[in-house]
Amino acid sequence: MRVLVQRSGIASVEVDHSIVGKITDGLVLFVGFTEGDSKDQIEYLAKKVVNLRIFPDENDVMNKSILAYGGSVLSISQFTLYADSAKGNRPSYIQALKGDEATTLYDMFNEELRKYVNVETGIFGADMIVSITNIGPTTILLER
Protein backbone atom coordinates (compact mmCIF):
# COMPACT_ATOMS: atom_id res chain seq x y z
CA MET A 1 0.00 0.00 0.00
CA ARG A 2 1.25 3.43 -0.94
CA VAL A 3 -0.11 6.81 0.09
CA LEU A 4 1.22 10.02 -1.41
CA VAL A 5 0.36 12.83 1.03
CA GLN A 6 0.18 16.48 -0.01
CA ARG A 7 -0.59 19.34 2.36
CA SER A 8 -3.11 21.50 0.57
CA GLY A 9 -5.22 24.61 0.64
CA ILE A 10 -8.15 24.35 -1.74
CA ALA A 11 -8.40 20.97 -3.46
CA SER A 12 -11.14 19.32 -5.47
CA VAL A 13 -11.88 16.36 -7.68
CA GLU A 14 -14.16 16.51 -10.69
CA VAL A 15 -15.82 13.64 -12.57
CA ASP A 16 -17.93 14.21 -15.70
CA HIS A 17 -17.88 18.01 -15.21
CA SER A 18 -19.16 17.75 -11.62
CA ILE A 19 -17.23 18.35 -8.39
CA VAL A 20 -17.55 15.13 -6.36
CA GLY A 21 -15.17 16.05 -3.55
CA LYS A 22 -13.71 19.29 -2.22
CA ILE A 23 -11.73 20.51 0.79
CA THR A 24 -10.54 23.97 1.73
CA ASP A 25 -7.60 23.07 4.00
CA GLY A 26 -5.98 19.76 4.85
CA LEU A 27 -4.45 16.81 3.05
CA VAL A 28 -4.82 15.34 -0.41
CA LEU A 29 -4.05 11.63 -0.46
CA PHE A 30 -3.30 9.57 -3.53
CA VAL A 31 -3.82 5.94 -2.52
CA GLY A 32 -2.69 2.76 -4.28
CA PHE A 33 -2.87 -0.92 -3.38
CA THR A 34 -0.97 -4.04 -4.34
CA GLU A 35 -1.32 -7.79 -3.77
CA GLY A 36 -1.04 -8.76 -0.10
CA ASP A 37 -2.22 -5.44 1.35
CA SER A 38 -4.19 -5.98 4.54
CA LYS A 39 -6.46 -4.36 7.10
CA ASP A 40 -3.45 -3.98 9.43
CA GLN A 41 -1.63 -1.92 6.80
CA ILE A 42 -4.72 0.21 6.24
CA GLU A 43 -5.07 0.93 9.96
CA TYR A 44 -1.35 1.67 10.31
CA LEU A 45 -1.21 4.09 7.36
CA ALA A 46 -4.46 5.85 8.30
CA LYS A 47 -3.02 6.55 11.76
CA LYS A 48 0.29 7.60 10.22
CA VAL A 49 -1.49 10.06 7.90
CA VAL A 50 -3.52 11.75 10.63
CA ASN A 51 -0.51 11.97 12.96
CA LEU A 52 2.00 13.36 10.42
CA ARG A 53 3.24 16.64 11.85
CA ILE A 54 3.33 18.71 8.67
CA PHE A 55 1.14 21.68 9.62
CA PRO A 56 2.56 24.86 11.14
CA ASP A 57 2.48 25.61 14.84
CA GLU A 58 2.44 29.07 16.44
CA ASN A 59 6.10 29.56 15.43
CA ASP A 60 5.43 28.56 11.81
CA VAL A 61 7.30 25.27 12.28
CA MET A 62 5.80 22.09 10.80
CA ASN A 63 4.88 20.59 14.15
CA LYS A 64 1.12 19.91 14.11
CA SER A 65 -0.86 17.01 12.75
CA ILE A 66 -4.15 17.46 10.93
CA LEU A 67 -5.79 16.41 14.22
CA ALA A 68 -4.23 19.37 16.05
CA TYR A 69 -4.39 21.82 13.15
CA GLY A 70 -7.84 20.98 11.79
CA GLY A 71 -8.87 20.37 8.23
CA SER A 72 -10.13 17.60 6.01
CA VAL A 73 -8.81 14.89 3.71
CA LEU A 74 -9.42 14.49 0.00
CA SER A 75 -8.69 10.84 -0.82
CA ILE A 76 -8.09 9.82 -4.44
CA SER A 77 -7.57 6.26 -5.68
CA GLN A 78 -4.36 6.12 -7.71
CA PHE A 79 -3.28 2.78 -9.19
CA THR A 80 -0.44 4.55 -11.04
CA LEU A 81 1.49 4.74 -7.74
CA TYR A 82 2.52 1.18 -8.67
CA ALA A 83 3.82 2.11 -12.12
CA ASP A 84 7.00 0.33 -13.17
CA SER A 85 8.96 1.87 -16.04
CA ALA A 86 12.14 -0.20 -15.60
CA LYS A 87 11.66 -1.96 -18.96
CA GLY A 88 11.05 1.04 -21.18
CA ASN A 89 9.01 4.18 -21.54
CA ARG A 90 5.55 2.65 -21.24
CA PRO A 91 4.85 1.94 -17.56
CA SER A 92 3.52 -1.41 -16.45
CA TYR A 93 0.84 -1.48 -13.76
CA ILE A 94 1.00 -5.21 -13.09
CA GLN A 95 1.76 -4.60 -9.39
CA ALA A 96 -1.40 -2.52 -8.86
CA LEU A 97 -4.26 -4.41 -7.27
CA LYS A 98 -7.22 -4.82 -9.60
CA GLY A 99 -10.89 -3.89 -9.43
CA ASP A 100 -13.07 -5.21 -6.64
CA GLU A 101 -10.22 -6.02 -4.26
CA ALA A 102 -8.71 -2.54 -4.61
CA THR A 103 -12.13 -0.89 -4.24
CA THR A 104 -12.77 -2.80 -1.02
CA LEU A 105 -9.41 -1.77 0.45
CA TYR A 106 -9.85 1.85 -0.68
CA ASP A 107 -13.26 2.00 1.01
CA MET A 108 -11.79 0.45 4.19
CA PHE A 109 -8.98 3.02 4.21
CA ASN A 110 -11.40 5.92 3.89
CA GLU A 111 -13.62 4.53 6.65
CA GLU A 112 -10.57 4.21 8.90
CA LEU A 113 -9.63 7.85 8.19
CA ARG A 114 -13.21 8.95 8.96
CA LYS A 115 -12.70 7.80 12.54
CA TYR A 116 -10.39 10.84 12.88
CA VAL A 117 -11.22 13.48 10.22
CA ASN A 118 -13.73 14.49 7.58
CA VAL A 119 -12.97 12.66 4.31
CA GLU A 120 -14.03 13.59 0.79
CA THR A 121 -13.28 11.21 -2.09
CA GLY A 122 -13.12 10.87 -5.80
CA ILE A 123 -14.85 8.01 -7.59
CA PHE A 124 -12.87 4.80 -7.77
CA GLY A 125 -11.91 3.92 -11.34
CA ALA A 126 -13.28 7.14 -12.82
CA ASP A 127 -11.36 9.53 -15.03
CA MET A 128 -10.85 12.36 -12.54
CA ILE A 129 -9.58 15.92 -12.72
CA VAL A 130 -7.83 16.72 -9.46
CA SER A 131 -7.03 20.34 -8.61
CA ILE A 132 -4.63 20.96 -5.73
CA THR A 133 -3.06 23.97 -4.10
CA ASN A 134 -0.03 22.25 -2.58
CA ILE A 135 1.15 24.20 0.48
CA GLY A 136 4.87 24.22 1.19
CA PRO A 137 5.13 22.39 -1.15
CA THR A 138 4.83 19.43 1.18
CA THR A 139 4.64 15.98 -0.40
CA ILE A 140 5.41 12.75 1.47
CA LEU A 141 5.29 9.14 0.29
CA LEU A 142 4.16 6.58 2.86
CA GLU A 143 4.41 2.86 2.20
CA ARG A 144 3.77 -0.25 4.24
Image (cartoon, helix red, strand yellow):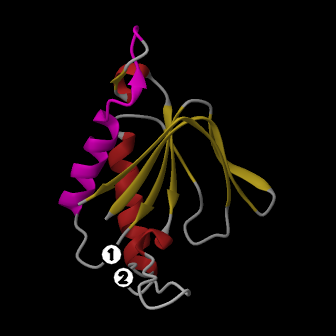
Q: Which mark is residue 95?
A: 2
Say which residue label 1 marks: 34
Q: Is residue 62 above or below residue 128?
A: above
Range drawn in magenta:
39-59
On the image, the x and y values in percent for residue 63 come to 32, 22
Q: Quadrant of residue 37?
A: bottom left
Label 2: which secondary element: loop
Q: Is residue 116 left or right of residue 76?
A: left
Near mark 2 (Cα within 10 A), the count class, few <14, some 14-19 or many ≥20, is some
Q: Quadrant of the C terminus?
A: bottom left
Q: Is residue 114 left or right of residue 76?
A: left
Question: In percent of the image, x 41 and y 60: which residue is there?
Answer: 107
The chief SS type of the magenta part is: helix
Q: Residue lying farthest right?
A: 17
Q: Is residue 110 above or below residue 116?
A: below
Amino acid type assigned to the residue bearing label 2 in the image? Gln
Q: Which mark is residue 122?
A: none
